[in-house]
Image (cartoon, rainbow, N blue to C red):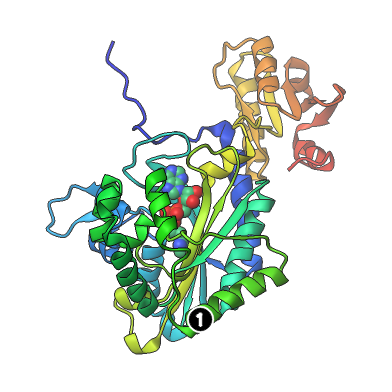
């Protein structure tokens, strides 16, 4: 036998039985996203590698270790998108939204790709529901509160219980720079005691030492710094306003003084939402403000265009809500042909076609020798609401026996009236 080819490691098929669950989640999410004024955007699943290097940062783990680059003959490289923010900002500038709107609010739902070591809740292809609010009018802390409220609203309505919101502020670009100098000074004496990764982070991206999971690094950090210092008044005021607004909206949060996030583009507010039942990969969503990303990707420096957004991991939502992917499909009707005579089958096929054109979900078998019993069991398996039966008698009388599978009653209905009959019964 020729060996089979398996699905790539860290990816999975979403099988037909699970599709109703995904569709349900997506349509529920779309409804909520639209009610907050966000509009859908669909960007390509791959971009120039340079886009991710410039936005997520050359030193971030995603760019350093996890970018899935495409082998092309061209000089310029392409990579599968590891997240959505960079692409949305690229599109925002390319399509001149900055000239059209003081604030553009986008959402996206789709697959992302990271070359990570797969484990529970950590995949190489996963799906995000994300938003980005971008524009010259985006500086207000009200927008931070709106975006966080939206993330919490989505999770609640998608069935995630016991989620926890953690927030922090990295401050403005200047404040970040000062803080990183201060942090380096204070950590220098302890550098040799940090884990190997953190010794590397000390050089490349000092902030990441703050959220190292290693116990001894945590102890060192706690001994030298209580939280990231916000060196300018506006940075402090912004963070205080965000907290006040979250209080006003009754959104519970915890200030996480060492939360810094792994992507370089953040400044001011950053947040992460965790949920129970996810194991070590317990972040169900995360986001934050990016004050300089638009300029870093070629936006007008004088226009002062900032943005803020988040992304929720759909697979992690499914894990947290324990939704097993076996929602039974239900179809409207299944056509059973009593005789394998081809005239009957052709008549049945025409009726099925007519019902399908009226958007009913109808099926039948095309294999003439399938027994009546196996056709009925197929109707049961597909959870058909009605079975349509075409036998010799019915064929002669130009009618169909319509069996209601919920109460097992049966009626003969003229062929031309089947659609109307089914609709009257609430189908379609
Ligand atoms: P992120 O924290 O890298 O942020 O990812 C957001 C969420 O995507 C995570 O909390 C998690 O639920 C899910 N996720 C990430 N990686 C994986 C993986 N390998 N397997 C399964 N799920 C995963 C971002 O992507 C930012 N773009 C969020 C953002 C938008 N910030 C501002 N705007």
Q: Residue at x 55, y 33 (%)?
A: 16
Which image quarter holds the N terminus?
A: top left
Q: Is residue 36 left or right of residue 417?
A: left
Q: Residue at x 41, y 39 (%)?
A: 123
Q: Which residue is nearer to you in this view: 322 or 243?
A: 243
Location of residue 343 with respect to 318 vertically, above or below: above
Secondary structure at numbered mark 1 = loop
Instruction: Let me know if residue 299 appears in the view.
Output: yes
* Pointer 1 residue: 139
Q: Position of residue 248 (x, y in %)?
A: 72, 72
| Residue at the bottom extreme of this rendering | 302
Q: Which residue is nearer to you in this view: 39 or 222?
A: 222
Q: Is residue 210 left or right of residue 40?
A: left
- Say whether mark 1 is within 8 Å of ligand 1: no
Q: Residue at x 41, y 77 (%)?
A: 172
Q: Position of residue 417 (x, y in %)?
A: 79, 38
Q: Position of residue 315 (x, y in %)?
A: 52, 42
């Amino acid at each position: 036998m020729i060996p089979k080819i398996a699905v790539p490691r860290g990816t999975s098929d979403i099988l037909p039985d699970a599709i109703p669950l995904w569709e349900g989640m997506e349509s529920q999410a779309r409804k909520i996203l639209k009610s907050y004024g966000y509009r859908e955007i669909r960007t390509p699943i791959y971009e120039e590698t340079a886009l991710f290097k410039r936005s997520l940062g050359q030193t971030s783990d995603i760019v350093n270790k996890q970018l899935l680059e495409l082998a092309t003959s061209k000089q310029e490289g392409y990579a599968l998108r590891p997240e959505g923010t960079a692409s949305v900002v690229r599109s925002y500038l390319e399509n001149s939204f900055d000239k059209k709107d003081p604030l553009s609010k986008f959402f996206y739902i789709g697959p992302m790709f990271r070359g990570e070591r797969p484990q529970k809740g950590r995949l190489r292809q996963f799906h995000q529901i994300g938003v980005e609010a971008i524009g010259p009018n985006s500086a207000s802390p009200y927008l931070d509160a709106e975006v966080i409220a939206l993330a919490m609203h989505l999770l609640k309505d998608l069935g995630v219980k016991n989620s926890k919101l953690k927030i922090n502020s990295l401050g403005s670009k200047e404040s970040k720079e000062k803080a990183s100098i201060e942090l380096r000074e204070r950590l220098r004496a302890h550098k040799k005691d940090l884990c190997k990764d953190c010794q590397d982070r000390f050089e490349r991206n000092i902030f990441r030492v703050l959220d190292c999971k290693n116990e001894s690094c945590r102890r060192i950090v706690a001994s030298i710094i209580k939280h990231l210092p916000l060196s300018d008044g506006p940075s402090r005021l912004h963070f205080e306003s965000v907290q006040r607004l979250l209080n006003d909206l009754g959104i519970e949060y915890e200030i996480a003084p060492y939360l810094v996030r792994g992507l370089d583009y953040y400044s001011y507010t950053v947040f992460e939402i965790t949920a129970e039942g996810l194991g070590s990969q317990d972040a169900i969503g995360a986001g934050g403000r990016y004050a300089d990303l638009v300029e870093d990707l070629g936006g007008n420096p004088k226009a002062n265009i900032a943005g803020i957004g988040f992304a929720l991991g759909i697979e992690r939502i499914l894990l947290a809500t324990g939704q097993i992917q076996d929602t039974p499909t239900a179809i409207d009707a299944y056509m059973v042909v009593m005789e394998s005579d081809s005239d009957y089958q052709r008549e049945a096929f025409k009726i099925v076609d007519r019902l399908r054109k009226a958007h009913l979900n109808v099926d039948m078998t095309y294999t003439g020798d399938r027994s009546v019993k196996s056709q009925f069991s197929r109707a049961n398996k597909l959870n058909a609401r009605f079975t349509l039966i075409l036998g010799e008698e019915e064929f002669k009388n130009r009618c169909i026996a319509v069996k209601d599978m919920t109460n097992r009653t049966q009626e003969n209905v003229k062929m031309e009236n089947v659609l109307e009959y089914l609709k009257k019964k609430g189908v379609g």
